Amino acid sequence: MKSRTRIFFVLLALMTAANGWTQDDAGASDDSEALKLAALEALIAAPPERALPLATKVLAGNHSKEVKARALFVLSQIDDPAAQQQLIRTAEQNGGELQAEAIRMVGIGGNEAALARLAGLYRSGDEATRRAVLEAYMIAGDVDGVFEIARNTESEADFEHAVNMLAAMGAHDELRQLRATAGLSSSLINAYGISGDVDSLLELVRDGSNPEQQAQAIQALAIAGTGKGEDVTSILRDAYRNSDTQVVRDAALQGLIIVGDDETMLQLYRTSDSAAEKRQLMQALAATGSDRILEIIDEALAEQ
Amino acid sequence: MRIFLHLAFAVALFAAGVASESRSSDLLQVTSDGWYSWHIAGTEDLEIHALIESGRPSEFYIPHLHCSRRNVPTPTDLGTIDAADSIAWLRRFIRPRTPATTGAIAAIAVHPGADAVRVLQDVVRSDANWDTRKEAVFWLGQSDNDAAFAFLDALLMDDRAR
């Protein structure tokens, strides 16, 4: 019995010690990882000739993805062709776990020669690579790079993604050029709204030849606002009143909800002769959360 | 007997540490509150400024690190001091961590020579405070010293992280 008890306590002691060793190892590992990240942060402001070999060595070594990603960032901050070359080499490693990160870092670095190399990667890359290249161009503010992708791609999804990037970059001229070369599309109308290209949207709002596109432009205009002396409320009201097409009228009403113009909606309600239309306008007013709906209720009660 | 010898050794080490600190303190001749400055021997224009409050530095100013001259009161000039003595004095204010720790580490880092690098390495290896260690790593990266970068290289190549 005594020997069994002794064995039990020895085993218990060993298990406790083993647990402690494991925790120590984990602690040392976390510590080591954190120190690596701190060392890489220190390299960002270190002399480039000192930082470059160390960052390159980290990339080639057996490290976590986070540590290697930080090394890529260090390289992106070094104004030296060798650093950019190393970034591009990593970016060109198809399927490499750091490929997309390296591509983005080329964007952060903003080196023109390295950015130019991304065009080839876009053409040969998979979807994740193509997205990373577009992000890199956006980070670098390289409108031409994104425009070339939008102009040359045959993929609808890629076109839309590039157009969204151009919209976020406020590239009015390039988006208008795309309308001339690729034709008007839903993604372009959205882009005009996002980029705030009111002139292009007004042109589309006043063009009744394609009601679907006109309706989309009306909603985009409501989101973009005007700001060039044009009164978005009167444009939406006129579109609602003057159009014979339901989809356009619906879009105009949606636009009024977006801009929250309860006064115009109340006017339209009072001048309408259609019960169905009145109901729709009342619902729109309710959607804006306006107190003006109480006036309609009071009027209705007074009529009874 | 063995325990007694260990205790005696520990007491001797402690006494040596206290003596060393006293010597550094005396060397800087800090007697009352206010701004003090000293020039580091062997350098052209490296100066350290310290605001002493209640016998301890509460703030450091290192003109070498600032593009424009900060508007600080004219310090009491302590003259030229050896880098080793300056580092030894500054080192006393790294731990425990206080608002002056960051300045003390930066001030140590600007000293030329291997002593500053050794102190920073020691802080990275053994300080209990993570922010203090991280600041020491940062300043090692700002030195243009082979030993500092060899140390960073060793940190980066430490296999325990995986």
Image (cartoon, helix red, strand yellow):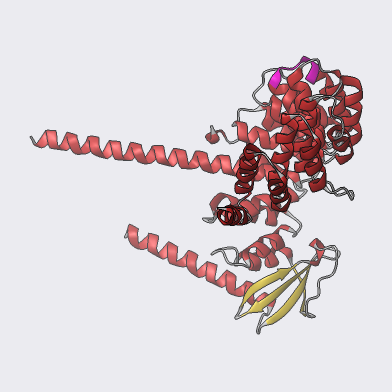
Most extreme residue toward the bottom, as rendered? B32
Magenta stretch, main secondary structure class: helix
From the viewer's perspective, is residue B41 above or below residue B116?
below
When asked about the image quadrant of residue B161, the answer is top right
Left or right for A297, reference B37: left
Say which residue appears at 70% left-offset and 27% top-offset. Answer: A100
The location of residue A36, given as percent across then percent down, is 62, 41
From the viewer's perspective, is residue B73 above or below residue A78?
below
Q: Quarter holding the N terminus of chain A? A: top left
Left or right for A146, reference B153: right
A296 falls in the magenta region:
no
Say which residue appears at 67% left-offset and 21% top-offset. Answer: A96
The location of residue B115, given as percent across then percent down, is 68, 56
Most extreme residue toward the left, as rendered? A1
Work out whether residue A220 or residue A239 is closer to the camera in this orientation and state it: A239
From the viewer's perspective, is residue B103 above or below residue A49?
below
Say which residue appears at 75% left-offset and 59% top-offset. Answer: B110
Magenta-colored span:
A122-127
